[in-house]
Image: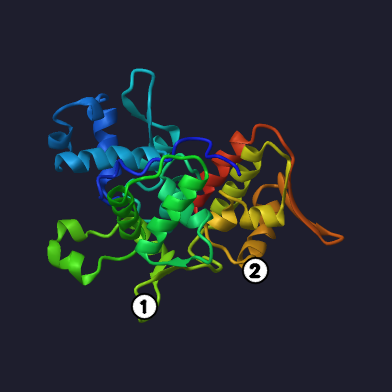
C-alpha cells in the first residue's frame, strides 16, 4: 500500500468558499503598499473583511496558484497571479469560464493544495456521495495511506466548504444573509450537482463545452511535463490522478475530441496519435514554458 507523499491538509479556508473579488483585492494591496499584507495584524482591516476571511483569502490565493510564500515567509503574487489579476490582466475579477476552469485546475489537480478537493475529483469512486459519506471515505483513505486522520469536526467543515465551492447557495444559506450566500465563481462550472430528489450529489462528467480547447491543451502539456515523459497514453490522460480527464471531469468522447485539436493548437508540439490500437499524446520536448505561456495567453485572448 502506498503512503501519502505529503501530509494532507484540511483547513485554512476558515469554512469560506472563494468569492469573486477577493483575489483581486488582495493582489492590489500586495503589489501596492502592503507586500507584507498577510503578516500584518490589520490585514483584515485593509481587506475590508473579518479576521477569518482574511485568512481564507490567503488560503485561496495559495491553492489557486496566484500567491506564494517567499523566503521571508511573506506572500507575493506569482507570475500567474500577475498575468491574471493585474488591472490589464487576463481576467482580474474571474468572470470568464476560462479563469474559473484554470483556478479549478490549480485547486483540484494537486494533493498538496487542498486534499479534500483533490480526493473528490481524482479518487472518489463512482462520483456520487453525500457530504457525510465523502467525509467518511476521506478519513478511511487517509488512515489507510499512512496519514493523520482528520477529526470528524475538521473533515465536516472541509467537506462543507468544498460543497459551497461548487454548488449554488441553497435556501438556508440565502436566508443566513447576503454576504454569506455569495456564490463562489467555481459554482458556475456545474461540476457538482445534487441528485434529483436525493440528499446525495454527483460529479457531472461530459464534454465540458465552456472549457476552452487551448486551456485543455495547456493542462495536457502540464500533465505530460510533470510526468517526466514525452508521451502520455490516452488512459492516463483520462483516468490517472491529476489528469485532465479526472480534474475536468471529461467523458472519453469529450476528451478524445479535445485531443484531436492538439496538433493545430500547438503547431505540432503536442500530437495525438492512434495507431494499431495504441492511443497516445506525443510531446516534442524542451522545457515547454513558451508553449504553456502561449496557450494560456490565447485562452484569454479568445475570450475577449
Residue extending farthest to the top is 72
Q: Circle 2 — which element? A: helix
- 31 vs 180, nearest the viewer: 180
Determine the residue positioned at 35% across, 62% down. 132
| Horizontal arrangement in the rendering, residue 201 relative to residue 110 (left or right) | left
Determine the residue positioned at 25% across, 50% down. 16
Determine the residue positioned at 34% across, 28% down. 76
Circles 2, 1 touching at the beta carbon (< 8 Å):
no
Residue 290 percent location from the top left of the image: 60, 35
Pointer 2: what residue?
253
Pointer 1: what residue?
198
**Front label number (2 vs 1):** 1
State which quadrant residue 179 falls in: bottom left
Q: Looking at the image, is mark 2 or mark 1 earlier in the sequence?
A: 1
Determine the residue positioned at 15% across, 34% down. 46
Which quarter of the rendering shows the C terminus?
A: bottom left
Residue 214 percent location from the top left of the image: 57, 52
In the displayed structure, would residue 190 be above or below residue 148? Answer: below
Which quarter of the rendering shows the N terminus?
A: top right
Residue 76, can we see it? yes
Residue extending farthest to the right is 276
- 103 vs 33, nearest the viewer: 103
Residue extending farthest to the bottom is 197
Q: Circle 1 — which element? A: loop
Amino acid at each position: 500500500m502506498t503512503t501519502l507523499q505529503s501530509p494532507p491538509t484540511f483547513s485554512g479556508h476558515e469554512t469560506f468558499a472563494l468569492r469573486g473579488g477577493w483575489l483581486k483585492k488582495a493582489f492590489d494591496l500586495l503589489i501596492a503598499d502592503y507586500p507584507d499584507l498577510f503578516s500584518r495584524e490589520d490585514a483584515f482591516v485593509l481587506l475590508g473583511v473579518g479576521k477569518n476571511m482574511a485568512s481564507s483569502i490567503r488560503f485561496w490565493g495559495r491553492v489557486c496558484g496566484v500567491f506564494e510564500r517567499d523566503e521571508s515567509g511573506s506572500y507575493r503574487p506569482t507570475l500567474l497571479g500577475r498575468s491574471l489579476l493585474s488591472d490589464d490582466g487576463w481576467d482580474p475579477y474571474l468572470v470568464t469560464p476560462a479563469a474559473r476552469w484554470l483556478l479549478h485546475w490549480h485547486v483540484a489537480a494537486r494533493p498538496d493544495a487542498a486534499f479534500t478537493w483533490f480526493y473528490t475529483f481524482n479518487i472518489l469512486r463512482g462520483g456520487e456521495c453525500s457530504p457525510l459519506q465523502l467525509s467518511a471515505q476521506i478519513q478511511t483513505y487517509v488512515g489507510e495511506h499512512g496519514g493523520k486522520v482528520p477529526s470528524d469536526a475538521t473533515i465536516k467543515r472541509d467537506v462543507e466548504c468544498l460543497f459551497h465551492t461548487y454548488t449554488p447557495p441553497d435556501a438556508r444559506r440565502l436566508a443566513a444573509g447576503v454576504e454569506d450566500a455569495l456564490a463562489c465563481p467555481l459554482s458556475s462550472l456545474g461540476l457538482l450537482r445534487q441528485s434529483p430528489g436525493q440528499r446525495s450529489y454527483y460529479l457531472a462528467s461530459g464534454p465540458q463545452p465552456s472549457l476552452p480547447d487551448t486551456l485543455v491543451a495547456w493542462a495536457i502539456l502540464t500533465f505530460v511535463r510533470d510526468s517526466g515523459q514525452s508521451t502520455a497514453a490516452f488512459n492516463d490522460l483520462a483516468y490517472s490522478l491529476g489528469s485532465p480527464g479526472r480534474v475536468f471531469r471529461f467523458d472519453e468522447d469529450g476528451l478524445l475530441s479535445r485531443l484531436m485539436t492538439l496538433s493545430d493548437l500547438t503547431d505540432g508540439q503536442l500530437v495525438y496519435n492512434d495507431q494499431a490500437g495504441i492511443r497516445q499524446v506525443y510531446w516534442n520536448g524542451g522545457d515547454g514554458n513558451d508553449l504553456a505561456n502561449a496557450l494560456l495567453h490565447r485562452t484569454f485572448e479568445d475570450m475577449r
